[in-house]
Image (cartoon, helix red, strand yellow):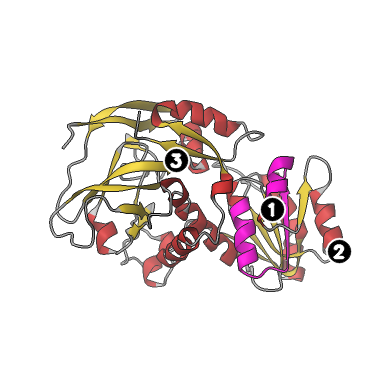
Amino acid sequence: MLVVVLKAAIYYGPKQLEIKDVDVPKVGEGEILVKVRAVGLCPTDVRIYFFGSSSVKPPIILGHEFAGEVVEIGGKVSELEIGDKVNVPADAFCGRCKMCRIGRENLCEDPLSFGYNIDGAYAEYVKIPKRFLSRGVIFHLPDNISFEEATFVEPVACSINGVRKAGVEAGKSVVIIGDGPMGLIQVQLSRLFGADSIILIGLHDWKLQLAKKLGADYIINALHSDPVEEVLNLTDGRGADSVIVTIGVPEVIEQGLKMAGKNGFVNIFGGSRKGSAITIDPNVLHYYEICFTGSSGYTFNDYEFAYKLVVKRKINVKKLISHKFKLSELFDAINQFQNKEKSLKIIIEPTGE
């Protein structure tokens, strides 16, 4: 077995991230070691890098959207073999707390989470703790699915939770605000869920055109027209049945509320900076009976569904990859992520440095 990991990105605090050599994690009973082949650069990781998070326990290796190859197996592990291609959820829920017992595992009070309270996948190797295996959430990857495609299972799972919380179903009209990877995933999910009309709002023409190819019926560039007015025009003044806000900007969330029709849903999908606030006219919620909610993470059922959609290619994730970087180029990847005009989904490849 190798003695050191060639590189790992260790987070110490806001704007304190170092790429350095670390020891290969030691595998104990019921654990496995995975050689990371691909990991997605998540917007949450970028936000943590710049602004920190009370949920993150530094020093810690970031990265949670990953796939790789099993290279070491601890005792009492029989369901895996060396060389298996696997995808692993970002979290292992405890299964004991109140939220887990009522089926809301995504709100677990004691999760193990890569890049938050256990070392994540911006590294050549990542140890998978016993809880992940005992909960049965290690997913084998078929040979025809690339590691890059498999990194999308976690964001697709989060998007499934978001689409469900937004009440998207057959015959409904849906507005998705945000032309990033999550918005484009949710366009495809809304189509799979049977939505009658899908409207995507964004700022970049090439992403909006891609959304059309992926299933959006209408696209709106918010730089060129009033998105609220456009949505009302497209819905004959009624507003949409479901509005999903993937952008955690207060003004955008407020716009989303103005787009919802009677008996509609507005779901805050994107996280906002700590201390953010919005202004709501309570009469809009009261008289229109709008359900104003949020969604965070996924349940294991969401994750299993997402895995099936990705491996069966019911969701086109290849089209969402705009850039690939080596782990040694992580800071370049973060800078590229900031360039929204040119970037979409960025994949980090830790091996082959």
Q: Which residue is the extreme one toward the front?
A: 144
Q: Which of 15 and 86 is in front in this view?
A: 86
- Tell me whether circle 3 and circle 1 mark residues in contact (CB < 8 Å): no
How would you rate the neighbour count of disc 3 (Cα within 10 Å): few for under 14, some for 14-19, many for 20 or more? Answer: some
Q: In which quarter of the image is residue 263?
A: bottom right
What residue did someone put label 1 on?
A: 213
Instruction: Tell me if 65 is positioned left or right of 130 in this view.
Output: right
* N-term-proximal mark, 3 vs 2: 3
Instruction: Tell me if 298 is positioned left or right of 34 in this view.
Output: right
Q: Residue type at mark 1: give it.
A: Lys
* Viewport quadrant of the N terminus: top left
* N-term-proximal mark, 1 vs 2: 1
Q: Residue type at mark 2: give it.
A: Gly
What residue did someone put label 3 on?
A: 53
Name the residue: 50% across, 26% down: 332
- The location of residue 90, given as percent across then percent down, is 39, 51
| Helix, strand or loop status at disc 3 | loop
Residue 339 in view: yes
